[in-house]
Amino acid sequence: MEEYITLQDIDEAVNSIILKTTCKPTIGLILGSGLGELADDIQDPNIIPTTEIPNWPSSTVMGHKGCLVLGFLSGKQVLILQGRSHYYEGYSMGQVALPVRVMLRMGIKTLFVTNAAGGINPDFSPGDVMLITDQLNLIGMAGLNPLRGPNLELFGPRFPDMSQAYDKKLMADARYSARLVGVDLKEGVYACLAGPSFESPADLRFLRLAGADAVGMSTVPEVIAARHGGMSVLGFSGISNKANLDGSTITTHEEVLEAGRIIVPKLKSIIKQLLSGMD
């Protein structure tokens, strides 16, 4: 496995996708665990299994279908990734970020990221949707950054700024869209850990003290790669379970997927309303 992704690796994937579709997406969406049904509303869908795309990291996790779906959603041409790959699956950070860089090479400049996350904020309940206002890159603080290695100057600078990882205008539009469709949109900071084990109660208490409102095992590497390439990013966490701060409950992946059934309709309504109002 190559640790670093080259421009040739990225363009091989891009060329493969272009040959399989006539869609010219302007917006990309990455869907997290149990949230793949968001792609069901795509009109004239063109579905490409990611196993058919050169160099693409295949998802091995239940709740991640491993497909690209291209088509129209609320009148906008979009590319939806049903199922992401994760560092804990054995991929390098460069491979985890490859889908975002493929989107960039395809001309996509706006990215929506979603994930299923544990709710650390005591005011959050399973089924809530949280607007991600900032991120805590604990996995990156340990050296696991998708930009490690030779910098691809075509995408962005060696040292990209991350002071505004999530676009302020898109966040404002998301708040407005949520009000229009009647969804109580929570807000907070998303913390990314490596996984695949769920957090201990001590881990969670530490994260809460550090300012995190939700925790998961994805998203942050994708956002870093997106911002490196100049993308505008909007993020949502579907709160799939209440954080086990005192060790009294057990967290399972099955409950994460089950919560998705409650979260998906809310996310669908927000995103479709948001897209319909975008230029």
Image (cartoon, rainbow, N blue to C red):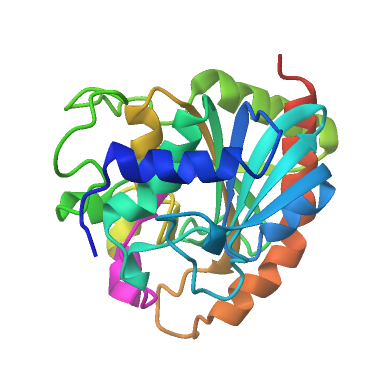
Can you tell which quarter of the image residue 44 is in?
top right
Can you tell which quarter of the image residue 28 is in?
top right
Q: Tell me where residue 245 appears, x and y as whole percent.
A: 40, 72
Q: Magenta residues, as a range?
A: 188-205
Q: Residue at x 68, y 59 (%)?
A: 36
Point out the image quarter for the C terminus.
Answer: top right
Of 228 and 118, which appears nearest the observer?
Answer: 228
Describe residue 26's horizontal placement relative to residue 232 as left or right.
right
Q: Is residue 202 above or below residue 92?
A: below
Taking the magenta stretch, the answer to whether it contains residue 204 is yes
Q: Is residue 184 above or below residue 193?
A: above
Q: Tell me where residue 72 appears, x and y as whole percent.
A: 79, 35
Of 165 and 155, which appears nearest the observer?
Answer: 155
Would residue 189 be visible to someone looking at this image? Answer: no
Of 243 and 98, which appears nearest the observer?
Answer: 98
Q: Tell me where residue 182 appears, x and y as whole percent.
A: 82, 39
Q: Residue at x 77, y 42 (%)?
A: 183
* Number of disc labels: 0
